[in-house]
Image (spheres, rainbow, N blue to C red):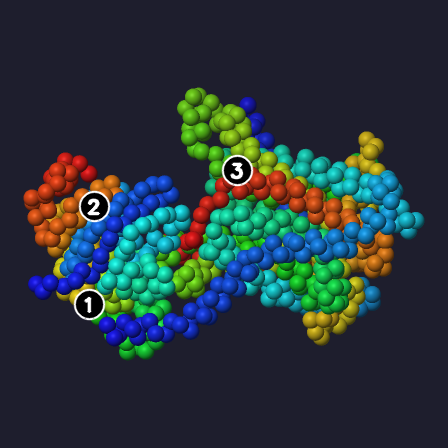
Amino acid sequence: MQRIGFVLLVLAALVVVLPILFVVGAIVVRGIGAVSWEFLSAMPRDGMKAGGILPAIVGTLLLTLGTALAAIPVGVGGAIYLSEYAADIWLTRAIRLAIINLAGIPSVVYGLFGLGLFVLFLQFGTSILAGSLTLAIMTLPIIISAAEEALRAVPTEFRTVSTSLGGTRWQGIRYIVLPQALPGIITGLILGLLRAAGETAPILFTVAAFFLPRLPHSPLDQTMALPYHLYVISTQVPGMPVDVQYGTALVLLALVLSMNVAATLIRSYYRRRRQW
Amino acid sequence: MVEQPPKIRIHDVSYAYGDRQALRNVTLDVPSKAVTVLFGPAGSGKTTMLRLINRLNDLVDNTRMSGRILLDGQDVYAPGVDVTALRRRVGMVFALPLPLPGTVRENVLYGPKLAGVREQSRLDEALQRSLTQAALWDEVKDRLDDPARALSGGQQQRLCIARSLALEPEVLLLDEPTSGLDPISTGKVEASLLDLKKEYTIIIIPHSVQQAARVADCAAFFLMGELIEYRAGREIFTTPCDQRTEDYVTGRFG
Amino acid sequence: MEKKESFINQIGRARRAEFAIETLIRTLGFSSIGFVLLIFFFLLREGLPVFFEVRPGNLFSTQWYPTFDLYGTLPLILGSVLVTVTAVAIALPLGVATAVFVREVAPGWAREVLKPMIEVLAGIPSVVLGFFGMTLVAPLIRETLRVPTGLTAFTGALLLAYMALPTIISVAEDALDAVPKGYRDAALAMGATRWQTIWRVVVPAARSGIVTAVMLGMGRAIGETMAVMMVTGNAARMPLTADSLLRPVRTMTATIAAEMGEVAQGSVHYHALFGIGIVLFLLTFLINLAAASTIFKKRRRGGLR
Ligand SMILES: Nc1ncnc2c1ncn2[C@@H]1O[C@H](COP(=O)(O)OP(=O)(O)OP(=O)(O)O)[C@@H](O)[C@H]1O
Ligand SMILES: [Mg+2]
């Protein structure tokens, strides 16, 4: 009985893990042939069937950068408030509820919201600006939760000592708590931005250009983006060469997974070095 | 000794955490430039008393306080008091050595830097003076830029004392500063106390009655939040007036 | 004494800067509430009109053909429900079993391998999974199950299950972790085998956490868009027949994503898509609210007050 049970558990774990290996493996194996310097650095040609995906790569990087610029100050500020200032009152509970709710809103609904607020109401048009802001709000709960956890992990004693030396609350945060929490905060930021870099639904109606073989000039420009480009070439363009599709999938996957690895490395490096 | 007005007057102070009464009607005058000892069994309110003086308990939620605490005749709880300035005048050392992250130098200069001191000469002077006062200078003068965590426990605790002294406080509050230390380190800390009391008003919670008897100029015995007996000199340890004090110092409980 | 004054004199200006920073932080702290309200407001603003433009009988009918002014949302809602419930039904046993394996049984090295793999899964963009589903899973389903097309509700549910797995596994792991060690020791001491201890004592004790895992997984699944849109065939039919799982289906999220690009701003169709957005918003709100009520119970404290 116990034997069979443990075998079943192992089987379940394998059923979970093997497909992951298979997805990543298949995309790497089939996509690697398409990835060349030209693929990464050239404009698309022949109705996207040939040439490269440079504008999509640049678009995704710009969107991620824009998301970072908007989400980091708000997210880290919000986390500092929750960890260092908020008293346990109903208002704080309302904030936490709001964050949980933000984390649960479907990405396509963020797309609708971005369309309604940024594209139409504020008249940013479909643009990098509108898309970045939409993605930033979507990323916010991830950043806040991770940063708050990192801040709370800093021992209370440090704050007490700082206070006893005539430090104000903000000074303790600025000189002790934030520097100590920084690696954890950065990890959380990367994990949030990785989400933003890979999302398609929120940018469908707020940024994405189907086919735009040039680099954007301003934040109010449209742009291509990797996830949307993959969607387009795998569903909307008949006769698309399979290796271009896999190549695009591979580039997107590599971008996202390398961010993932970076976050993991930072976390484990600083965990080992931490003094408390 | 010249009769000086008390440095700190604690007048009829009661204090509660939620509905747990921690101090009851404590009245106590702390003389200037002397070592005052607060002793008593665990949970008798000594730490609470100490943390009320530099208003560190402002950080605790859901508490009630009555009574007054005067520093040089000024009510430290009066409206408009600059709490951070008060804490610069009243330094504190905790039961465990709690070095901040960073180097020895950064630890000592943390307070002065927060207070806005920028001139390198004054910072250097503060560094050497406070480490010397804490009897640590000779041991760390070549390791000023090592991580504070790399020091031994006893050195760390003296570093914490130096860190408080760097602000040139008038009062030094020490909460069982030697509880984690070996006898030799303890001896060094006690010796530096005797030096320090020439310039500072010191209130210390000792980690044993023996230590209390070694360092006290005045001693106050606390029991369950009440001040049972308070006297100048060391007679409280040899000829206590109150039965409960006698039971405690002779080791019958606590 | 004079020196002491000089320590204090530079504080005034710093105080004002600090007040500004603290005010900013407080404002940022409340911003999350503002964003939720803002999102809800804009969904209502663009979506509410549909409830006046389209008769309720039409809205809740079984036909979604916007070109013919038929806005029946039932097939979409049921499509989402079918795919989501199936996904959770697949993911729950797998996820809990994996969590039990990782927490209670696995040797250290297996844990070290499994955890990063599951993080990788969590990081794979949904459009990549959708692409993979289209090109490799769908043909496989078509051939093994001998159905006319591999783009079925089941294909979508399968992908969704994997997308929900990281959430379910990590919440279930936390729940198992929270079971006091004493329970295990007591059961073992009474002569139970490890297997009995796990299934009769540990897992039941973690029940409420596992319920949370299910709800969060469900919230994740119902809101998923791209992968579902790419592999479910997107036919807006009522999934009421027995073979519905093996036929194409269309979810609420896929409908919005597929059609929003083509509608005129301000049209009835446009309002209808926002209307679906309102439904999705409320649905995920309720699911997460329910999940949150269990999470709130175990908050720990951190900074100074
Ligand atoms: N932050 C707090 N919240 C609630 N109650 C507290 C807090 N700090 C202390 N108390 C309670 O107040 C009473 C006095 O505590 P205090 O720490 O002042 O005693 P103490 O004399 O310093 O004891 P010890 O010798 O153990 O350090 C105790 O009953 C304690 O449980
Ligand atoms: Mg104490």
- Indicate the secondary structure of the residue bearing disc 3: helix
Q: Which-is-in-front pick, marks 2 and 1? A: 2
What subunit carries mark 3?
C
Mark with earlier residue (2, 1): 1
Which residue lies under the disc numbered 1? B132
Q: CA separation, marks 2 and 3?
A: 48 Å
What subunit carries mark 1?
B
**Residue at figure coordinates x 53%, y 42% from the top left:** C296
Quarter of image, res C161: top right
Query: Tag 3: residue type?
Result: Ala
Left or right of A159: which side holds A199? right
Foreground residue, C27 or B128? C27
Q: Are marks 2 and 3 in contact (CB under 8 Å)?
A: no
- Indicate the secondary structure of the residue bearing disc 2: strand
Foreground residue, B102 or A144? A144
Q: Residues within 10 Å of mark 2 (few under 14, many from 20)?
A: many
Above or below for B231 versus B106: above
Above or below for B241 versus A85: above
- Indicate the secondary structure of the residue bearing disc 1: helix
**Residue at figure coordinates x 78%, y 58% from the top left:** A232
* Ligand 2 within 8 Å, label 1 CB: no
Q: Residues within 10 Å of mark 3 (few under 14, many from 20)?
A: many
- Residue A46 location (% of width, % of height): 83, 67
Left or right of B86: which side holds B136? left
Q: Is residue B6 visible?
A: yes
- Residue B238 location (% of width, % of height): 7, 45
Which residue lies under the disc numbered 3? C175
Which residue lies under the disc numbered 2? B227
